[in-house]
Image (cartoon, rainbow, N blue to C red):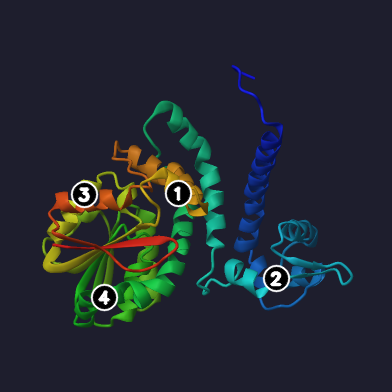
Amino acid sequence: MAGNEKLDLEKARRVAQGVMGDVASALHIQLCYIGDRLGIFKAMMNAGPLSIDALAAASGVDRRYLREWAAAMVAAQYVDYDKSAQTYFLAPEYAAALADDQSPFFVASYFQTAQAAAAIAPRVAQAFKDGGGVDQSEYPPSLFEAFERNSGTRYRHKLVRKWLPAMPQVVQALDHGGIMADVGCGGGRAAVMIAQAFPNARAVGVDVHPESIARARELAAHRGVADRVTFEVGDAGSLPAEKFDFVSTFDVVHDAVDPAGLMRSIHNAIKRDGTYLVQEINVSDQLTENISTLGKLGYSISTLYCLATSLAHEGAGLGIGMGEAKARELAASAGFSQFRRLPIKDEVAILFEIRP
């Protein structure tokens, strides 16, 4: 031991066990990724207890691999095992989280996030040594698909049902044919969902990631709203002046290369009576207040993606813990005069209503 520090053997043992637990979880997540991508969890949903042969037939995967996979799920207590009958059962509560992508509790998409982030980690490690960052083009396409799936659950159950009703002037504008812009729209799920909910509204989505824009256009066509929703490769600076009744950024400001410029461009693009909605992750700008599962998840994603992609272009690198104070500062410097944290209790999201 260095210096005169005395090792607390019991604490050291607990620490080592905790770290091993994290390693086990990291490896287990890769099997969960397989279960999600191959539809194994879905095959188990509402199916009752299944033998390995029955599960193999239902999922279409190799029996021997499946038996080992199922053993890992039992060991992790994701799946119940009946020793006498040799059957495996996915309880409804686990099915809601792992298999039912229409459920408000669905989180299996995060397995895809973890798998893609693990693949890019060596490249981010190099940036740790060399400085700079990692350009979006270097990330696997599956990461952006995972981000869209993650946010899709929030949008489906909260965007139109809870978030927009907290801003009556936005609902009124969209009802009467208003125009919205979603900046950093990714695969376009928010804009398309709003267009579906408000048949008179029109929407524009912009994002600097071409592959995401291609998926957004496909989604709009598939959902039958392509006549009212358009998507373009670009950023807030490409939006026309004083055109939009409503502008949104969902999980965008904290990883923007130029967050101050982003807000100035949005201020320029929004109508004088318009509304700008900023959604960020519900963590504090005080580290000690983020010692939690969400903090652990948020800082990890921020380091592996948000920070790295901003620094790749010598950006601000705010990171996920930018907090409400920073959001207020950016809004004021951009020329906005009204700032309100929406009174919505949400475990993951924090929302700010900003007006000219």
* Disc 3 residue type (three-letter): Glu
Where does label 3 land, which residue?
329
Front position in the image: 146 or 218: 146
User: Residue 267 placed where, x, y %?
Assistant: 15, 58
Mark 4 element type: loop
Label placed on residue 228 = 4
Rendered-image quadrant of the N terminus: top right
Element carrying mark 1: helix
Tell me the mark number nearer the camera, choosing from 1 and 3. Answer: 1
In the image, 53: left or right of 309? right
Query: Could you tell me which residue is drawn at 53 percent across and 71 percent down?
Result: 101
Foreground tag (3 vs 4) = 3
Give the percent coordinates (x, y) of residue 163.
33, 71
Name the one closer to the observer, 44 or 279: 279
The answer to whether mark 2 and mark 1 are in CB contact below 8 A is: no
For label 2, the crowd category at 10 Å Cα-Cα, with few meaning under 14, some 14 to 19 and many 20 or more, is many
Q: Earlier in the sequence, mark 1 or mark 3?
A: 1
For disc 1, the marked residue is 290
In this rendering, would 195 be left or right of 260? right
Q: Are marks 4 and 1 in contact (CB under 8 Å)?
A: no
- Residue 120: x, y in percent? 50, 42
Label 3: which secondary element: helix
Quadrant of the rendered image containing residue 312: top left
Classed neighbour count for the residue bearing mark 3: other residues with Cα under 10 Å, few (<14), some (14–19), many (≥20): few
Q: Quick check: 194 above or below 298? A: below
Residue at 71% across / 36% down in the picture?
10
Q: Quadrant of the C terminus?
A: bottom left
